[in-house]
């Protein structure tokens, strides 16, 4: 279904002239320079024209449709047709280590074009051939721009013409004809379209833009080792895909992954692309939702915030597009030269919007003004490890599957967050939100040990002792902070981990300590704190010897709720409350 | 479905399954449901003789379709068939390769199905021999009821064993109600014609996939 949906996306992009997507046999390449010739084939006075554009401080090559695709990797001689790097086009290479090889490259390039002169029969093409025949590679030294370019690709143009030689009608015709002829390839049933046709041997173009893949590109459908081949078939014959279908899905995927694309985001180690069957606003919007850093200007941020708020309450914003439009999400991750599919999700806009809304509703927890109301998935994953590179690799796929399918969140995420809380003793908004969401979904989809959903804000009447113990810990910590201001190590730094895991050994000591703290306080605050501690203590019937993982999560949530409650301004200040 | 004496219903289930898509063999991704060829493999594992050929008629997907991912360390080489043949001829030789050789290791990710349960409806054709249909049927039924097999049936890949049970009566209701298009699925391999794969359009209606006859997929030039 994945390849089929991608090839349908290609069809949609082809019918949209603004997309600039390459037709069969062509590809989009970065062209840095252009060799400008006279009609008789000599190099014009302009010489080499720089086609790079300014992008911030740097000059970057322009993207252009050229015949053929990128070169295969390796040390072979592969001259392209009317475009190539300076070594092939002019026999020039900066700091040439192998001048004989460069000369060979130039000869191959020249021979390829000269051989086609009579067949194409175009005056500009003949000019190129004449140029190549008479060109001496040594003369390249006189062209200063070449050394500055340090590689990059170039094309040909005749002075006075607007278009490039490879865009001439006869040249274009020739190329389209010969690209269809192909060698006697195998025929079979294509597994994407179901029709019979020639089977692609290698799936070109390679997929570029997946994080972690080799820079030259990787392949989804690849059989680059013996062990992956079956029934004696070699390479892509193991998975017959028609040539057209192969070109289409690969080109469409490259389009989605291109730099500057708003339809791709990075979540953990997975590069995620998404699209809809027909052009909709949702295609842009979901990119920002998964990665808000892309939204630079404030007006856009406000609009997004409004959208998310509406989705979170279960409303479907009609501006996204027709609710029945099919929506596709594909998560990819790289393994050297291969790409593996982390997850694939296909549904309607309405369903995706509902699921995302449910996700944010589950995540909702009381927060301060500084905290983001709708933390994106990468931020959730970030809380599971100390550094981004330590995030467990499969978590991103599992998290996205859980969000899009409305399934319980991965157990590993819950456990990782608890581990991080114990390691660095911080319980922030995002971590509490994750814990609350995991517990809520667990209680909703299976009969967990909890009867009610975890609340968004403080609920003093919660029956679970773990929750109350978390609240108690927060109160004890505040008592200590008020009694001994400016302390380096509070009880949270020393005892949070053990209090949440083995309360029976820790809480009696903490309660004894709190008596000393209370003694240090003035009368007013002392009564206030004492009352709050008592209010929680009377709900507890002793302390459990050991709390399981789920209860440790409740402990952390109780702590967070209580802490938030303490620091929320209430009308009477602390001193007055004590005098009541 | 006519109740001829060669129709069988077999319920299979397992924790993990991987009906590998041919286009994603390196980093395995599973189809959404069991393929007819995998179902045939299960039936053959329980009972098969050269005199019969199994045909899968219908597949019931009973549990919701859920995926999970795994990453495993595997090897990149195969022992070439030519080497094995020459060693057989000579009578001695070294056929192994080292599993922990750094060059040989490949880490491969796999996207698998979780908690699967299927009901396979199939029948066999008697290709030769003198035994009547009923005899083959009884043998299969006995073996399926007792849990006997030639090799342990598996769900797509050998490392995902399948539990099985003989099923009588009406097929149970599936958790997958409604119509769902599963796209082109591999039907089976045409062993008679260069092991060419044949694909069919799988439509799951209330959890039931009707499998077209293999011959109807036609020879593709």
Image: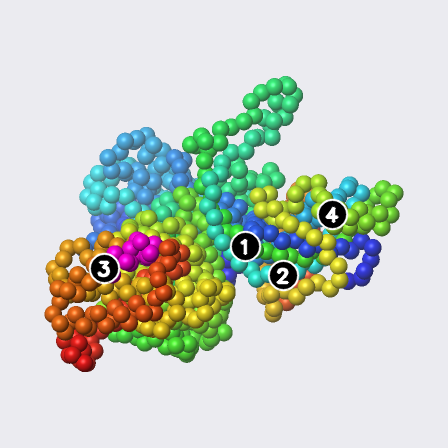
Residue plotted at (60% across, 65% down):
B175
Q: Which residue occupies the foreground of this view, A560 or A344?
A: A560
Residue at screen point 68% across, 57% down: B119
Q: Is residue B153 above or below residue A315?
A: above
Looking at the rendered image, the quarter that the N terminus of chain B falls into is bottom right
Q: Is residue A508 magenta?
A: yes
Q: Nearer the viewer, mark 3 or mark 4?
A: 3
Judging from the image, mark 2 belongs to the subunit labelled B
Q: Give the CA distance from mark 3 to mark 4.
A: 66 Å
Left or right of B216 on screen, residue A17? left
How would you rate the neighbour count of disc 2 (Cα within 10 Å): few for under 14, some for 14-19, many for 20 or more? many
Q: Position of residue A511 (x, y in %)?
A: 25, 61
| Chain letter of the residue carrying label 1 | B
Residue underneath mark 2: B62
Classified by dominant secondary structure, the portion drawn in magenta counts as helix
Instruction: Say whether residue A131 is left or right of residue A143.
Output: right
* Crowd band around label 3 with a 10 angstrom C-alpha radius: few (<14), some (14–19), many (20+): few
Disc 3 marks which residue?
A512
Task: Look at discs 3 and 1 and give the one toward the viewer.
Answer: 3
Q: Position of residue A458 (x, y in %)?
A: 31, 72
Whichever of labels 2 and 1 marks the residue nearer the N terminus, that label is 2
Same chain, labels 2 and 3: no
């Amino acid at each position: 279904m994945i390849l089929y949906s991608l090839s349908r996306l290609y069809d949609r992009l082809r019918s949209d002239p603004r997309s600039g997507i390459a037709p069969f046999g062509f590809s989009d390449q970065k062209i840095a320079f252009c060799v400008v010739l006279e009609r008789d084939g000599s190099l014009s006075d302009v010489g080499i024209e720089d086609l790079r554009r300014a992008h911030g401080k740097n000059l970057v090559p322009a993207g252009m449709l050229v015949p053929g695709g990128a070169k295969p990797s390796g040390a072979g001689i592969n001259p392209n047709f009317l475009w190539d790097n300076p070594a092939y086009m002019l026999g020039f290479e900066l700091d040439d280590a192998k001048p004989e090889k460069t000369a060979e490259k130039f000869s191959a390039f020249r021979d390829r074009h000269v051989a086609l002169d009579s067949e194409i029969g175009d005056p500009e093409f003949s000019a190129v051939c004449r140029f190549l025949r008479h060109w001496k590679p040594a003369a390249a030294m006189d062209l200063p721009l070449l050394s500055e370019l340090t590689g990059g690709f170039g094309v040909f143009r005749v002075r006075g013409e607007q278009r490039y030689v490879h865009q001439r009608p006869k040249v274009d015709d020739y190329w389209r004809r010969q690209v269809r002829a192909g060698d006697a390839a195998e025929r079979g049933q294509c597994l994407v379209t179901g029709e019979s046709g020639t089977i692609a041997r290698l799936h070109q173009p390679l997929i570029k833009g997946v994080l972690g893949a080799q820079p030259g590109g990787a392949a989804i459908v690849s059989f680059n080792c013996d062990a992956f081949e079956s029934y004696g078939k070699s390479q892509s014959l193991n998975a017959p895909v028609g040539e057209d279908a192969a070109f289409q899905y690969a080109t469409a995927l490259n389009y989605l992954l291109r730099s500057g694309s708003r339809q791709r985001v990075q979540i953990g180690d997975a590069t995620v692309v998404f699209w809809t069957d027909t052009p909709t606003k949702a295609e842009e919007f979901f990119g920002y939702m998964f990665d808000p850093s892309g939204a630079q200007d404030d007006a856009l941020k406000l609009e997004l915030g409004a959208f998310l708020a509406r989705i979170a309450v279960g409303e479907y914003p009609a501006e996204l597009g027709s609710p029945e439009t099919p929506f596709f999400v594909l998560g990819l991750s790289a393994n050297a030269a291969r790409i593996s599919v982390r997850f694939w999700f296909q549904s309607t806009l309405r369903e995706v919007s509902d699921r995302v809304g449910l996700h944010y509703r589950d995540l909702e927890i009381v927060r301060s003004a500084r905290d983001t109301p709708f933390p994106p998935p990468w931020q959730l994953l970030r809380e599971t490890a100390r550094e981004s590179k330590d995030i467990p690799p499969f978590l991103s796929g599992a998290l996205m599957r859980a969000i899009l399918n409305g399934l319980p969140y991965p157990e590993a995420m819950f456990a990782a967050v608890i581990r991080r809380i114990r390691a660095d003793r911080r319980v922030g908004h995002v971590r509490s939100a994750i814990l609350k969401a995991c517990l809520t979904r667990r209680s909703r989809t299976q009969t967990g040990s909890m009867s009610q959903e975890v609340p968004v804000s403080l609920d003093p009447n919660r029956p679970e002792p773990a929750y109350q113990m978390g609240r108690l810990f927060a109160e004890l910590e505040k008592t200590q902070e008020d009694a001994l201001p400016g302390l380096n190590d509070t009880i949270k730094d020393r005892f949070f981990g053990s209090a949440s895991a083995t309360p029976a050994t820790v809480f009696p000591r903490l309660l004894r300590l709190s008596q000393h703290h209370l003694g240090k306080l003035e009368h007013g605050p002392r009564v206030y704190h004492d009352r709050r501690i008592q209010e929680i203590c009377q709900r507890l019937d002793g302390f459990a010897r050991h709390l399981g993982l789920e209860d440790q999560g409740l402990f952390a949530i109780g702590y967070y709720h209580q802490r938030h409650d303490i620091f929320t301004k209430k009308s009477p200040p602390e001193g007055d409350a004590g005098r009541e | 479905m006519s109740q001829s004496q060669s129709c069988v219903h077999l319920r299979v289930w397992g924790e993990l399954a991987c009906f590998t898509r041919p286009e994603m063999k390196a980093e395995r991704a599973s189809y959404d449901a069991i393929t007819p060829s995998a179902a045939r493999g299960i039936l053959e594992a329980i009972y098969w003789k050269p005199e019969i050929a199994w045909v899968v008629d219908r597949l019931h997907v009973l549990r919701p379709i859920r995926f999970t991912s795994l990453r495993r360390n595997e090897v990149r080489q195969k022992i070439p068939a030519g080497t094995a043949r020459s060693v057989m001829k000579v009578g001695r030789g070294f056929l192994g390769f080292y599993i922990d050789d750094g060059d040989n290791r490949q880490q491969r990710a796999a996207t698998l199905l979780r908690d699967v349960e299927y009901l396979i409806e199939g029948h066999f054709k008697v290709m030769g021999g003198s035994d009547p249909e009923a005899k083959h049927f009884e043998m299969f039924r006995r073996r399926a009821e007792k849990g006997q097999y030639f090799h342990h049936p598996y769900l797509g890949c050998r490392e995902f064993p399948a539990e099985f049970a003989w099923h009588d009566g009406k097929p149970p209701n599936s958790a997958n109600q409604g119509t769902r298009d599963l796209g082109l699925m591999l039907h089976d391999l045409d062993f008679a014609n260069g092991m060419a794969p044949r694909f069919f359009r799988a439509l799951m209606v209330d959890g039931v996939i009707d499998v077209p006859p293999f011959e109807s997929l036609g020879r593709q030039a």
